Image (cartoon, coloured by chain):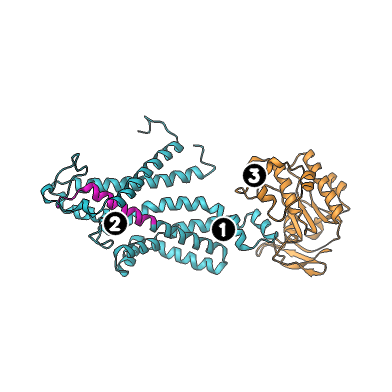
Chain colours: A orange, B cyan
Amino acid sequence: MQLEAKDIGFRYGDGPWLFQGVNITLEPGEIVGITGPSGRGKTTFCRILAGFESPIEGAVHMNGAPLQKNGYHPVQMVLQHPEKAINPRWKLHQILNEGYQPDQELLNLLGIEQEWLTRWPHELSGGELQRFCVARALGPNTRFLIADEMTTMLDANTQAQIWHAIMEIAKKREMGILVVTHESKLMQRLCHRVINFNEFD
Amino acid sequence: MIKKFPLNRKQRTLVKIIISIIFLVTVILGGVLLDEDKIVTNLSERNSAPSLEHLFGTDWLGRDMFTRTVMGLSLSIGVGLIGAIGSASIALLLGMAAATMGKMADRIISWVIDLFLSVPHLVTLILIAFTLGGGFKGIVIGLTLTHWPSLARVIRAEVMQIRSAEFVQVSQKMGKSRWWIAVHHILPHIVPQLLIGFMLLFPHVILHEAAVTFLGLGLSPHEPAIGIILSESMKYLSSGMWWLAFFPGLCLLIVVRTFDQIGENLRVLMDPTRNHD
């Protein structure tokens, strides 16, 4: 299971190229970081990998074959703002079980408490909601996880707890992770190698 | 009135809902319980002014105006309900279809909405009712086919906004089908809009039904619809029989105004950013 981005290029409409010729390979169990200044297309690139957007040039391959458009996407993405990634009219147990039924072990690992499940999203804080987004993305068929500034808006304790849980699961399942963050210390601690997105202008 | 009883918007809405429920129950029960016997002509009691025996007076044939008004309102509300439900269903269907079925469908449906909105719907309504030969069937079909465009446009805009939300994209990548997303993610967001749209459509439909019937193109004259009562009483107004038009008109006004305001208040109350004023 290898995720491969080949010569990806993207632009919005007829605008200038956001990036061109991006080549990234992600091995199972590998944790790769992406850095670069704001507005260079890091998020757009992540969205392409997760299938939210199709690239203008190039293609994303999984084990040498292009990814399916329908069905469960093996590359799941956790976004920066959990409150936007959650349907405000759903109770949290519905949100959690949308893709699959997470087991109790995972919930404990992420610190999701049983009583939260019967509440509405606006009754929980951003950090609490983000745990749900992470749990939701860690389905049994998830091979790669993309964390796009996933913990940027959270406090240090919550950050540590969530990352700790994800690292443990990644190790157990041989899951590849792509980390986008501006915090170089977090990057150094987590990642096996770091890609500078500045090079792909 | 409002200064004397300082009620907030929620309480005022509640009061209006109670008034409208009382109205609906009397009118619907009245429409069922009262039969043609109550409005038989009674020439010994012609043209009598409102009294305790005849609350709304009697007309030029001695028929009790209260009974006629209740029966007329019952008919109008029935027509209004069927018309509003039909219109709201068409609006929901077309709004959802326009926003989810691709560019071509959207273009066609938007064009049809614009087409219908560009002609005053009283004109289209008269045209359709006339083509179908008038009567109950004609007017109901006419009302259903003419009142959906503005609500359909609102629903289309709403669906488009939710369709591009992040939680919908996430759901797609979890392998959920379009249909599943439409039912589970999009529909719950549309329901409040639909409800409010329906509440605002209802008085509109009743008023248009009365208007078309008043013009003589709607329900047939032997059915005691409010529009017919009003148009018949026109002749007698000049001879000082004010009660013939006053009470039925007032009742119609109250029904239409309360439902209109309930709809309007619901819209404000369901808007999370405005429901605190």
**Numbered mark located on residue A121 in the image:** 3
**Numbered mark located on residue B160 in the image:** 1
Residue picked out by circle 2:
B211
Q: Residue lying furthest right in this view?
A: A192
Give the CA separation, mark 2 to mark 1: 36 Å
Residue range of the region highlighted in magenta in the rendering: B61-81
Q: Position of residue A40 (x, y in %)?
A: 74, 55
Position of residue A60 relative to residue B159, above or below, is below
Assign the magenta stretch its main secondary structure: helix
Residue B78: in magenta span: yes
Q: Which residue is located at x 42 percent, y 33 percent?
A: B7
**Numbered mark located on residue B86 in the image:** none
Query: How many marks overall?
Result: 3
Q: SS class of the residue under badge 3?
A: helix
**Label 1 crowd bin: few (<14), some (14–19), many (20+), radius 10 Å:** some
Chain of the residue where label 3 is placed in the rendered structure: A
Please state which of residues B56 and A28 is positioned toward the viewer in this rendering. B56
Q: Can I make out residue B120 in this image? A: no
Q: Which residue is located at x 55 percent, y 55 percent?
A: B187
Q: Position of residue A92 (x, y in %)?
A: 66, 46
Residue depth check, mark 1 versus mark 3: number of the one nearer the observer: 3
Residue B133: in magenta span: no
Q: Amino acid at mark 1?
A: Met
Q: Which residue is located at x 38 percent, y 31 percent?
A: B3
Q: Position of residue B86 (x, y in %)?
A: 42, 60
